[in-house]
């Protein structure tokens, strides 16, 4: 069993047609993006004959029947099953899911998407079996997790450039630190920043003025202010957190984790 990641998946989609795709990971934006890219290659959601989507509470027999149906006036049809909890289903239902994956014909693209449902991809025998069956039937499994900070910084700087703005790498990194690594959030914040500066430069001050900071990032910055002995900045940020009605125990817990991480590195 081998689970690939985003870079390999890009090459797969570009160069190879598969019968089965399994998507897991913690980045919902990336999963939905690649599912849409694959499905749109063969069909679209408005095609009632060649596009079918099922939720996790469906009857797997209906999924199986849909997979085996021939496409209408097309080479392939697309069947998507989202958030099917194979770890809690009955043995017969799990076996049926295995059958769907094993018997997906060349005339169908079957996509098993774990969108909201979190799946442990490592040391999970049931998941490993699904991946193995997919590989035997011209399929692959991909784990799409949040991109690394350098990748997100590159995405933001290039995105700003396409919109006629300049976004310094340090300022882009600061946005990731304060807004988090969710791509949907970062793209939304980038749109706001570019609209604000028009065709100008996006700086750290611009990010502070326009963007919304996550609570986790604010508490993390509070920890840094304490380490740097910047009392004024720490008290100001603490006042903001109290204004947001954040429980003191959450603040203390996050600060404690900061110190623990620091001690581990030392």
Image: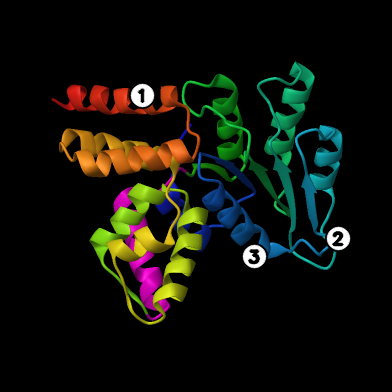
Q: Residue placed at 25% from the left, 62% from the top?
A: 169
User: Does 102 sit left or right of 266 as displayed?
Assistant: right
Residue drawn at (63%, 38%) of the image: 116
Magenta stretch, main secondary structure, is: helix
Foreground tag (1 vs 2): 1
Q: Is residue 149 magenta?
A: yes
Question: Can you tell which quarter of the image residue 115 is in?
Answer: top right
Residue 239, placed above or below residue 94: below
Helix, strand or loop under label 1:
helix
Inspect the magenta stretch and tell me whether residue 30 lies in it.
Answer: no
Instruction: Locate residue 201: give its quadrant.
Output: bottom left
Q: Secondary structure at mark 2?
A: loop
Q: Nearer the viewer, residue 102 or 229?
A: 229
Residue 263 lies, in percent from the top left, at 18, 22
Of labels 3 and 1, the one closer to you = 1
Question: Mark 3 sits on what residue?
Answer: 41
Pointer 3 or 2: first along the chain: 3
The relative height of residue 16 versus residue 25 in the rendered view (above or below) is: below
Q: Which quarter of the rendered picture does the C terminus lie within?
A: top left
Residue 252 or residue 217, whichever sits in front: 252
| Viewer-proximal residue among 49 and 226 | 226
Residue 121 showing in the rendered view? yes
Kind of element beneath mark 3:
helix
Q: Which residue is mark 2?
A: 48
Q: Earlier in the sequence, mark 3 or mark 1?
A: 3
Give coordinates of residue 261: x percent, y percent: 25, 26
- The reply to whether callout 1 and callout 2 are in contact (CB within 8 Å) is no
Location of mark 1 (residue):
252
Q: Residue furthest left?
A: 266
The answer for how far apart the CA atoms under marks 3 and 2 are is 16 Å
Q: Is residue 102 left or right of residue 134?
A: right
Task: Report whether residue 12 is seen.
Answer: no
């Amino acid at each position: 069993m081998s689970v690939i990641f985003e870079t390999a998946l890009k090459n797969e989609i570009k160069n190879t047609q598969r019968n089965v795709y399994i998507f897991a990971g913690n980045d919902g934006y990336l999963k939905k993006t690649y599912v849409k890219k694959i499905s749109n290659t063969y069909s679209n959601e408005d095609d009632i004959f060649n596009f079918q989507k099922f939720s996790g509470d469906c009857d797997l027999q209906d999924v199986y029947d849909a997979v085996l149906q021939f496409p209408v006036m097309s080479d392939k049809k697309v069947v998507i099953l989202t958030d099917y909890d194979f770890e809690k289903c009955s043995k017969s239902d799990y076996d049926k899911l295995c059958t769907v994956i094993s018997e997906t014909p060349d005339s169908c693209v079957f996509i098993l998407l774990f969108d909201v449902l979190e799946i442990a991809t490592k040391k999970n025998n049931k998941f490993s079996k699904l991946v193995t069956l997919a590989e035997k039937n011209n399929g692959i499994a991909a784990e799409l997790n949040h991109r690394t900070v350098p990748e997100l910084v590159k995405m933001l700087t290039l995105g700003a450039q396409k919109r006629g703005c300049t976004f310094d790498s340090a300022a882009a990194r600061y946005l990731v630190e304060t807004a988090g690594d969710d791509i949907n959030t970062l793209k939304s914040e980038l749109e706001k920043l570019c609209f604000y500066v028009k065709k100008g430069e996006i700086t750290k001050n611009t990010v502070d003025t326009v963007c919304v900071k996550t609570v986790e990032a604010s508490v993390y910055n509070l920890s840094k202010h304490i380490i740097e002995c910047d009392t004024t900045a720490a008290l100001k940020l603490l006042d903001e957190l109290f204004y947001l009605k954040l429980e003191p125990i959450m603040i203390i817990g996050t600060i404690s984790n900061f110190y623990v991480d620091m001690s581990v590195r030392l």
